[in-house]
Image (cartoon, grey):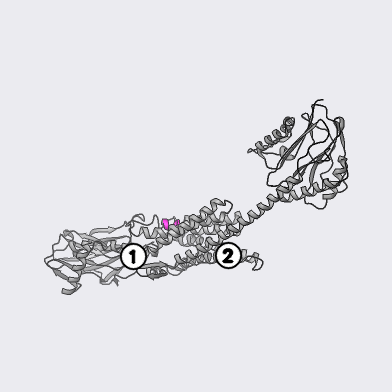
Amino acid sequence: MKILLVCLISSAAFAQTAPASETAQSSGFLVDLSGPWRLSPDDRPAYAAPDYDDRAWPSLELPRGVTYFHGKSYWLRRSAQLPAAVDRTQVSLTLGAIQDVYEVYVNGKRIGASGNFDSFEDALTPRARTFEIPPEAIASGGSLRIALRVRGILFYHPSWRLLDEGPYWLTDSAHAPKDAGRRQLEERFVRHSPSLTFAAVFAVIGLISLLGWLSERERKELLWFSLVSFARAFASSYLSLALLADVRPFNRIGITPEFVFGNFQVPFFVEFVFAALGYNSWKLRAALWVGWSGALVALQTSSLNAIWIIGFPAYLWVSCLGLFVILWDWRRIGLKGVAGEQHALRLVLLLSSFSFCLTWSQLLYFNSIAFAQAITTFGEQKIPHIAVGPYHVQIDDIFWLFVSVTILALLFRRLAADRRERQRLSGELEAARMIQQLLLKKSGLSEPGLQMEAVYMPAQEVGGDFYFVLDGQMVFLGDVSGKGLKAAMVVSILIGVLRNTEERQPGAVLQALNRAVTGYIDGFVTCSCARFDAGGQVTIAGGGHPAPYVDGAEVLMESGLPLGVDAEAVYPESPLVLAPGSSMTIVSDGVIEAENAQRELFGFDRTREISGKSAREIAEAAKAWGQNDDITVVTVSRRLA
């Protein structure tokens, strides 16, 4: 700050006492080099020579405001004369924000440079810089021939460019404005600092969306929207933070982290569109990521043709893919019969996708019309913004804040509605479960000496398995195809028929059940029925159900068709005797079809081997193996006399 203060005071004194172009005082001197410089678009080493005749070259006024862009290396030349009695060991040259890479020659001697001509990796932020002129580079009469070799290729995004405001001075080293460039960067940082506030807001939005996804993992749109918000936050913050760093802000051909990761906002947003609208087509996702990969590969090459011919068109394709999907989806669902919130979400998505398409269309437009010319007039002042005191608030940040807050509100409104619907369905399922438990209320067999155990483990809140004891004499175990509430409703119909039927023979009862459901249900029902009489006499009949087991062996019996297939089906009966000390086991196919992590079924053999155990042990073994369906086990044992 002291140097800056001295510089300002000295400059004011010079302005009052002498012409700006050439001033000398005992305390220092200043030669103003602003104004016309000679320009050549060619790149020849001879242009550095002090005696080269450049009078035929056209002139260029410096400082010129916007950073000069020519498309290839060019030279600038200017003559200057030091005042008499100047200490030639303390002479400094200050140049404005000419370009990212250039070399400085004085009387044919290279005195310094900004960046490296041979590498795209070593470019420095364009800003005012000061170079010390060695005494041997100054001619005996104090004349100076200043030549600048400038690399015309400048890949900085317009947001990175400092306006060339000078100064272009020759001064004594003590009064050189060495902090001018740093001051420009700091002023620039203040100007763009609102982007940090927006970045923080976008990061918070991304965090909220991520937390929402962690609580509802099936809502992939929340995950993708969080990635969109984080990418936007990075893009907004990286620019402001890097403005204070006098280092290259890119890796190759201008591919900045802000440019690459920040622009991942585009494919993340398209993925968000797919998830929000319920599109999970692998073809769409392949089209998205193949296009994006092509854009990244093109941008990582050293070929401008690849960037303009492949890279930016691929970006445009990816951007417009989301727009096409939104329009197609809107055409598919129409404008009627859909909640207003869904239309609001699609409208916001449409505006966002259109903004992406517009951005990349503009870049392609610049390429189609002499890009080198277009970019020279595209500086900071052309970036749409609102000036609030010393701050610039970019219109793009305001737009995306509106979009992000609106989308987040709509997503969480949808999430809340889904939770309310799940709670309602959960309440209905709980009520159905309680009703089903009442219908399947446990009861035993009335025949002396018989002991029954039943275990029912539904795969969901309510299930399609059922067991029922009729008049303390007949045991039914059935399995409705399917799961959940629909299967439970069929069970209710079957229990109602059993409670009201007057039939008491297994085959006749199964016929009654079959007539009740045929033509009224989607699917079928398997069922096994056993009637227990005095002296261990048992009569069994089945409709497509696994045969019972007696003392570890499968009962040989003739089975009829599953219920609900043919209204005229007949169900044969098979007699057997349950000896004292013996037991009969009836299972649903949820036991046999239990599946472990290796996709191996529990199977008939394992079921037969454990069929002599208690109903609880059999059910627990199947569940531990891997339950994927309702499990029901009924055992009937005859005590020893």
Left or right of residue 493: residue 340? left
Q: CA distance from mark 1 to mark 2?
A: 39 Å
Secondary structure that dominates the magenta span: helix
Looking at the rendered structure, the secondary structure element under dot 2 is helix
Q: Is residue 43 visible?
A: no
In the foreground, 563 or 488? 488
Residue at x-position 88% and y-position 47%: 568
Range of magenta residues: 257-261
Label 1 sits on what residue type?
A: Leu
Is residue 259 rendered magenta in the image?
yes
Residue that appears at 56% across and 62% down: 410
Is any part of residue 7 visible from this angle?
yes
Residue located beneath label 2 in the image: 346
Badge 1, how many Cα within 10 Å: few under 14, some, many 20+?
many
Residue 18 horizontal/vertical position (percent): 16, 74
Q: Please tell me the numbered disc located at residue 336.
A: none
> In the rendered view, does 125 fall on the left or right side of 625?
left
- Mark 1 or mark 2, which is nearer to you? 2
Which type of secondary structure does the marked residue at label 1 adopt?
loop
As drawn, the label of residue 162 is 1
Give the quarter of the image for residue 175.
bottom left
